Image (spheres, grey):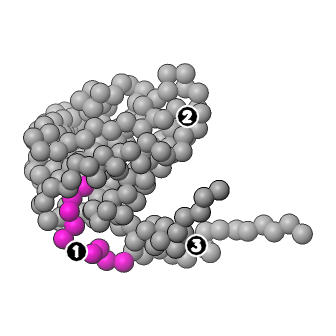
Amino acid sequence: MKKFKAEEINELIRSRRSVFPKDYTGEKVDDAIVKQMLENANWAPTHKLTEPWRFVVFTGEGLKKLAAFQSECYKQVTQAKGTFDEKKYEGLKTKPFECSHIIAVAMKRDEKKSVPEWEEMGAVFCAIENMYLTATAYGIGCYLSTGGVTNYEEAKEFFGLSKEDKLLGFLNIGMPKGSPAEGKRKPIEDKVKWINLP
Ligand SMILES: Cc1cc2nc3c(=O)[nH]c(=O)nc-3n(C[C@H](O)[C@H](O)[C@H](O)COP(=O)(O)O)c2cc1C
C-alpha cells in the first residue's frame, strides 16, 4: 500500500482552523480550489456507498440570492413565532458578502433508507472535514456555520431538498488575512481507553 508523508498530513490536520469572515480579506478564492474541495468531499467514507452529501455553492451574484432568501425565511418563521430579532435578520442579510463562497451542505436521504440517518449525517460531516482540510492545504480560510436557517423546514425547498433530507450547515469560505491562532484541545489521553489483551 502506498505511503504518504505522514508528518505533513499530521501537521495539516493540526493546523486546520476555523477561520471566520471577520478574518477574510474580501478577495475572491479561485473557483478551481473550491472545486477541489468539493471533489475531495466526494471521497468521504460512506456506508453502502449511498454518497449522501449534497452541496449548493453560492458565489458572486449567488451570494445575493442566499442573503435575500435566508433573511426573509428567518423573518417569516420567527415573526410567526414571535421570536424575531432585528440584529439576526440584518446579519443574515449582510454577512454572506464577507465571504468569497458559501457552500450549503446537506444530507440527501437514501430512498431505500438502507442505513440509519445518523450514519448518513456522519458521512456528510466526514465530507465537510475533507473540505476543511483541502482549504487548509491551499491556504484558504473556512468555517462551518450551523446557525441561521440550518434547522428550518421552510428552508429546504430553496436548497432542492425534500422532507426526508437535512440541511446541515453552511461552509463559509474566504481568503484569510493572516495565520490563525493556534488551536486548543484537551489531551487525547483523557478521551481514550486502551484495552490490552495479554
Ligand atoms: C458540527 C459543527 C458545527 C459548527 N457550528 C458553528 C457555528 O454555528 N458557529 C460557529 O461560530 N462555529 C461553528 N463551528 C466551528 C467551531 O466553532 C470550531 O470548529 C471550534 O471553535 C474549534 O475550532 P477549530 O475548528 O479552529 O479547531 C462548528 C463546527 C462543527 C464541527
In the picture of the structure, the residue carrying the numbered disc 3 is 188
Q: Is residue 48 magenta?
A: no
Find the residue positioned furthest to the right: 198
Q: CA distance from mark 3 to mark 1?
A: 28 Å
Q: Amino acid at mark 2?
A: Leu
In the picture of the structure, the residue carrying the numbered disc 1 is 178
Mark 3 or mark 1: which is in front? 1
Nearest the eye: 177 or 80:
177
Residue 145 in sight here:
no
Q: Is 153 left or right of 52, judged from the image as shown?
A: left
Q: Secondary structure at mark 2?
A: helix
Give neighbour class at mark 2: few <14, some 14-19, many 20+ (Cα, 10 Å): few
User: Going from the N terminus, do you reach mark 2 or mark 1 first?
Assistant: 2
- Please give the range of residues in magenta: 173-182
Q: CA distance from mark 2 to mark 3?
A: 31 Å
Residue 8, placed above or below residue 2: below
Callouts 2 and 1 close, C-beta under 8 Å = no
Whether disc 2's CB lies below 8 Å from ligand 1 is answered: no
